[in-house]
Image (tube, rainbow, N blue to C red):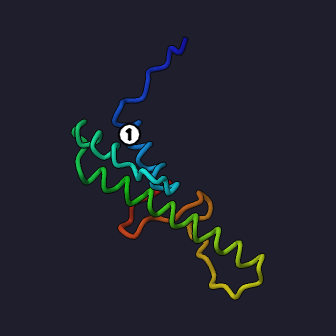
Amino acid sequence: MNDQPQLHNSIVAMVSLASGIASNHPAMGQCQLERLRGYGVPEHQIDAVIEIARHIRDEAAEKLDHAFDEKAGVAIAPVSDEGESCGCTPTPSGQSCC
């Protein structure tokens, strides 16, 4: 039996929404959006989760493309290594993803 408290349903929905977006899941977190709104999570917090998840997804794709291009010998533009210590850079609006 687990004596640890469970995560609040809104946190689970945020994690699910973010991971669905970051992984390009076909459902795109639509049901989590409705759950979050139903739990009373403010729209600006939902927007921040979406922005961070998209940023992580896009950054991962950029780094994968860069690594592939290096192996393939394709001429490549340098990828910023800013934020490399934690694995991510801030989103365009300045949200931290670390």
Q: Position of residue 6 (x, y in %)?
A: 43, 24
User: Which residue is nearer to you in this view: 2 or 80?
Assistant: 2
User: In which quadrant of the rendered image does the N terminus lie?
Assistant: top right
Q: Position of residue 32 (x, y in %)?
A: 35, 43
Q: Is residue 20 above or below residue 40?
A: below
When asked about the image quadrant of residue 70, the answer is: bottom right
User: Which residue is nearer to you in this view: 62 or 72?
Assistant: 72
User: Looking at the image, which residue is at 31% across and 56% down?
Assistant: 47
- Which residue appears farthest toward the bottom when viewing the image? 75
User: Which residue is nearer to you in this view: 94 or 76?
Assistant: 76
Q: Amino acid at mark 1?
A: Ala
Q: Is residue 20 left or right of residue 30?
A: right
Q: Is residue 48 left or right of residue 69?
A: left
Q: Is residue 61 left or right of residue 20?
A: right
When asked about the image quadrant of residue 16, the answer is: top left
Q: Residues within 10 Å of mark 1 (few under 14, many from 20)?
A: many
Q: Position of residue 40 (x, y in %)?
A: 21, 39
Query: How many numbered dots are placed on residues in this image?
Result: 1
User: Looking at the image, which residue is at 34% across and 49% down?
Assistant: 30
Q: Is residue 3 left or right of residue 80?
A: left
- Which residue appears farthest toward the front when viewing the image? 26
Q: Is residue 17 above or below residue 53?
A: above
In the structure shown, which secondary structural element does the residue marked by tag 1 occupy? helix
When asked about the image quadrant of residue 93, the answer is: bottom left
User: Looking at the image, which residue is at 70% across and 88% down?
Assistant: 75
- Which residue appears farthest toward the top when viewing the image? 1
Q: Which residue position is annotated with label 1?
A: 13
Q: Position of residue 78 (x, y in %)?
A: 63, 82
User: Looking at the image, which residue is at 35% across and 31% down?
Assistant: 9
Q: Is residue 11 above or below residue 85?
A: above
